[in-house]
Image (spheres, grey):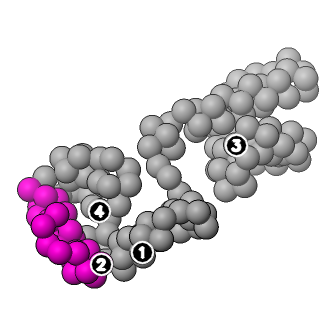
């Protein structure tokens, strides 16, 4: 484990490089900050010995690129769509799409989460149960009740 002074020196020397690499790969400020912190935490906990400053800089570049790639390949990132993308639907989206999304967002949280995970993310009831720490049969019940609420709020005919 490195001293606080060593870590502070490394941040001062390599912060710009790491931050720029993160932004180039991730194109997202929040994810870049997460990876930035992880890289310097890894450095602080590392016991690697560097031959010179260039060797240290190369280590930071390699670790940063690998951390960005890991984040981009992560299961969580590949299976999600930011809610902002759904809320900011383009003008050409069918009008009922916006109405349905508003109805889903208006559901109580206990229904909203399973509906979002099932219909927008494509998870099965057993998967949702594991994620939300609920029994799969409970998830089926929540989905059925949510469909009923959505049908009522959207004025459906009840035969869906």
Based on the displayed image, in which of its 4 quarters is residue 132 positioned? bottom left
The quadrant of the picture occupied by the N terminus is top right
Foreground tag (2 vs 3): 2
Residue drawn at 90 percent across, 41 percent down: 13
> Magenta region: which residues?
137-160
The residue tagged 3 is: 26
- Residue 154: percent from left, percent from top: 30, 78
Camera-side residue: 98 or 67?
Answer: 98
The reply to whether callout 3 and callout 4 are in contact (CB within 8 Å) is no
Q: Secondary structure at mark 4?
A: helix
Relative to 41, residue 59 above or below: above
Q: Mark 1 or mark 3: which comes first in sequence?
A: 3
Mark 2 vs mark 1, CA separation in Å: 8 Å
The reply to whether callout 2 and callout 1 are in contact (CB within 8 Å) is yes
Q: Main secondary structure of the magenta part?
A: helix
Mark 1 vs mark 3, CA separation in Å: 32 Å
Q: Secondary structure at mark 3?
A: helix
Identify the disc placed on residue 99. 1
Foreground tag (1 vs 3): 1
Q: Mark 1 or mark 4: which comes first in sequence?
A: 1
Can residue 10 be seen in the rendering of this structure? Answer: no
Identify the disc placed on residue 108. none
The residue tagged 2 is: 154
User: For residue 144: magenta?
Assistant: yes
- Residue 110: percent from left, percent from top: 26, 72
Foreground tag (2 vs 4): 2
User: For residue 55: magenta?
Assistant: no
Mark 3 residue crowding within 10 angstroms, few (<14) / some (14–19) / many (20+): some
The residue tagged 4 is: 115
Foreground tag (3 vs 4): 4
Image position of 2 (left or right of 75): right
């Amino acid at each position: 484990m490195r001293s606080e002074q060593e870590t502070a020196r490394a941040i001062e020397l390599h912060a710009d490089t790491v931050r720029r690499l993160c932004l180039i790969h991730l194109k997202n400020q929040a994810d870049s900050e997460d990876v930035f912190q992880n890289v310097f935490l890894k450095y602080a906990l590392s016991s690697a010995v560097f031959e010179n400053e260039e060797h240290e800089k190369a280590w930071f570049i390699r670790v940063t690129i690998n951390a960005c790639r890991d984040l981009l390949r992560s299961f969580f990132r590949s299976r999600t769509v930011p809610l902002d993308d759904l809320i900011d639907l383009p003008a050409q989206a069918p009008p009922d799409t916006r109405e349905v999304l508003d109805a889903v967002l208006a559901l109580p949280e206990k229904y909203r989460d399973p509906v979002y995970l099932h219909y927008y993310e494509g998870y099965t009831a057993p998967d949702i149960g594991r994620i939300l720490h609920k029994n799969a049969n409970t998830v089926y019940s929540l989905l059925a009740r949510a469909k009923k609420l959505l049908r009522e709020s959207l004025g459906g005919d009840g035969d869906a």
